[in-house]
Image (tube, rainbow, N blue to C red):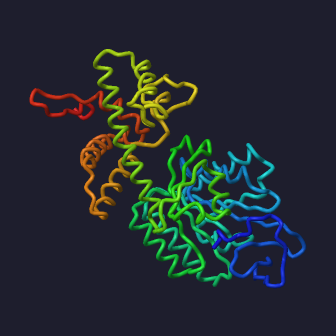
Amino acid sequence: MAAQNANAKTQTKTDDAAKDNWGWWWRPGSNAKFYASCNVISVNYGFIGLGQMGQHMARHIYDKLDIENDKLYVYDVFPQAITAFVDNVTSIKPEHKHALTPLSSIKSFVHDVENPLDFIITMVPEGKHVKSVITELTKEYKSVNPSYSTTFIDSSTIDIKTSRECHEIVKNELPEFDFIDAPVSGGVAGARKATLSFMLSREDDASVSPELRELLSKMGKNIFPCGSQHGTGLAAKLSNNYLLAITNLATADSFQLAKSFGLNLQNYAKLVAVSTGKSWASVDNCPIPDVYPENNLPADVGYKGGFITRLTRKDVVLACESAKMANRFLYLGDVGRHWYDKACEHEDIANRDLGVLFEWLGDLEQDSVGNVIDTKRK
């Protein structure tokens, strides 16, 4: 596996090394690549999905490349996203430009790279997209009968069942390769600042290879092994995002209650921040504008950007469905799903940050018999 790459930059060629058809020397059982005439190891990265999260994650890899040896290859289904990414990162750090290559297809990660890739990270919207990418990569890698190995790291938030299917595809078709579920927490702000938390299907810290840890540390701040069974990373992610969705809904409701009492909402938000009601939804993603202007929160720009409500709803649905697979009933699952379903009936709510639920709940009214009326749909 790529996780077996030599973690020292001083490894040299030995008698048990062999030369593959890429012109590199490699050690059996390892994907470490080094020149016979020098002692420098290279690491080659692939990144698929340059959306709101992926563009920042890939940018941090680009920024931290060893530009004398490492390479980064990127792809997105939308060509304009690739162009925007390349233009952005190369304008900020032009000295790394030669180490970055945009690709035009998934199969290019196998056939159009200078040397075999150690890691390919995916950050795409849904399970069907992950499965499509992994199926195509597996097919293309099999066609070249590789003597090396690559580790696929999926940081998408998808259903556990599909992720396990992808793991089985890789295990059965490419036994020397690996597929790891490594979803993240921290949102767009965490991706931008490289403070993400990664949740891995690994038993403990010792089972996270130095090479994998080094890669994830380029993009994040915390690495949490969640269990040896594949899918435990996603299980942790869905459990966390279920909690986020419910606390976000409660936060919006609480701030509307405070508003109805005539409280100063900026001061109330600061009170909550140092009180028992404190949560990520009430502080780090405070739904009240101008409370923390220095943090550039979505609430300060009309709830644009951030973690959109539609994706929050998706995670609630995935959590509820995964709970059923585990024979677990979520007591607030149906309640949360109901309100996120209702909110997402409005496109302008669905495509804005989840903090917008505060604004949306303010548009709801009750009639004389207690029925909720959505004034936005009148």
Q: Give the side of residue 35 with respect to residue 274, left or right.
A: right
Q: How many marks?
A: 0
Q: Position of residue 260 (x, y in %)?
A: 28, 19
In the image, 77 versus 167, the foreground residue is 167
At horizontal 84% and vertical 77% (from top left) the residue drawn is: 13
Q: Give the side of residue 90 with respect to residue 373, left or right.
A: right
Which residue extends farthest right?
Answer: 37
At horizontal 33% and vertical 37% (from top left) the residue drawn is: 249
Does 108 sit above or below residue 51? below
In the image, 307 versus 176, the foreground residue is 176
Does 343 sit above or below residue 123? above
- Quadrant placement of the C terminus: top left
Q: Give the side of residue 198 with respect to residue 378, left or right.
A: right
Q: Position of residue 38 (x, y in %)?
A: 88, 70
Does 349 sit above or below residue 45? above
Does 260 sit above or below residue 248? above
Q: Position of residue 343 (x, y in %)?
A: 31, 40
- Quadrant placement of the N terminus: bottom right
